[in-house]
Image (cartoon, grey):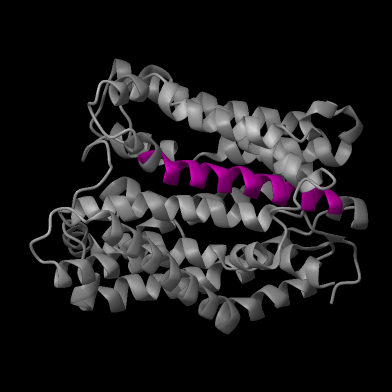
Amino acid sequence: MSKGPSVYFPGLNALRFLAAAAVMVTHIELMKLYFGLRNVWVNADAKVSSFPLKHALNGDFDWRAPMVAEAGPLGVVFFFVLSGYLITYLLCAERTQTGSISIKQFYVRRILRIWPLYYFILLLGFFVLPHLAWFEVPRQSAQLNDNFSGNLLFFTIILPNIAYSLYDAIPNIGQAWSIGVEEQFYFIWPLLMLLYGRSWRVIVVFMAAFIGLKMGVLLFEAVYNPEWIGPLKKFLAMSKMENMAMGALGAWWLYHRREKIPKWVFASRVPWVSAIGVLALVYLTPKFVQNGIHLVHGLLFLLIIVNISNRPRGSEVLENRTFDFLGRISYGIYMYHMMIVVLAMHIVRHLLPETKALTPIQNVLLYLGVTALTIGVSAASYYGMEARFVRMKKKFSAVVSGDNAKEV
């Protein structure tokens, strides 16, 4: 066990689970679309309309559609902000504790936490599930077969977001694209913090440069519109490293300049106001600014994270054994849930082959069944495989964090 200090932020395990649950809701309704069941999606092509509130009030679609469609992307943005926040805070603490940052030990810690489950999911997704009829996804399975070698190559070198950009999603494990984004950020970030991390300005420059790159690509597309721009635009849209940098900036200021953070940030009303703001933006954001609204979402999520994890009594409701358990296995929930959803859709199709729309009771049973089975599989994965690697991280940690910190 590391003899260094420990860092544990209360309430964040609960938030991790809620974010993973939001992604699961979106994917259940998306798979209904693929399997020919009535769903509350906006349509087959777009996640949100130009003005969702106006269209919902006019009866153009179910009022739940924008929220269901956006729940998953919002959950991913939350994970990105949280990743930048936690990683940067721990790097700041490591520099204080040791006088420097060990790049090697950082990479080892990330490998121990991410790679075992990632590569296990890869093996299932490429070599096991495609041979089982109950895990076939209409349209997606054909895409995997048509581009098997390319998909496998990019997933193997942990660039699943590039595979998604070139070939689109593959069945059962397509959600792993976000793991690629995080791993690419983790590759860059400790180097940047080691060289320039004593100043918050480097984080702002990184954020501005990445946003500028995206704006440049959009402008280039508007002027020239070459055929190859589509995959690049999709890749950059998925790579929301500016959200990670936003979380990093919050962590830097919290660690080095906490006394300069306005007191209202830690007020009890901030999480509620921020959450309401996120929900309101789903309905009020016009189409022409939707490419950048994730920045506002990220800021609101950062306020929630900083407030709940640092305010006395701010995490009382969220800090309990149930949420602690669900948060511990949230990585598994995120990685396993899609295959469980696909399996559930096949079961529905087997039991109700002619059904076009599930009844309310059937929908409740579907959601409960998917949730329960996903939690069960994720718990077995965590305690049967992942936990031993999580414990190994202590040997490479100047600052003990996460689940290990709670056990110190």
**Residue 187 in sight here:** no
The percent position of residue 145, horizontal first and vertical second, equals 19, 65
Q: Residue at x 80, y 66 (%)?
A: 405
Residue 92 shown in magenta:
yes
In this rendered view, identify the residue nearer to me: 290 or 350: 350
In this rendered view, identify the residue nearer to me: 317 or 241: 317
Q: Residue at x 16, y 61 (%)?
A: 142
The answer to whether 73 appears left or right of 146 in the picture is right
In this rendered view, identify the residue nearer to me: 2 or 71: 71
The percent position of residue 272, horizontal first and vertical second, equals 64, 35
Give the vertical position of 244 relative to 204 (above or below). below
Give the vertical position of 329 relative to 174 (above or below). below
Give the vertical position of 302 relative to 163 (above or below). above
Q: Quadrant of residue 32?
A: bottom left
Q: Residue furthest front?
A: 361
The answer to whether 33 appears left or right of 195 in the picture is left
Secondary structure that dominates the magenta span: helix
State the quadrant of the C terminus.
bottom right
From which residue to which does the magenta span run? 69-93
The answer to whether 34 appears left or right of 374 in the picture is left
Q: Quadrant of residue 353?
A: bottom left
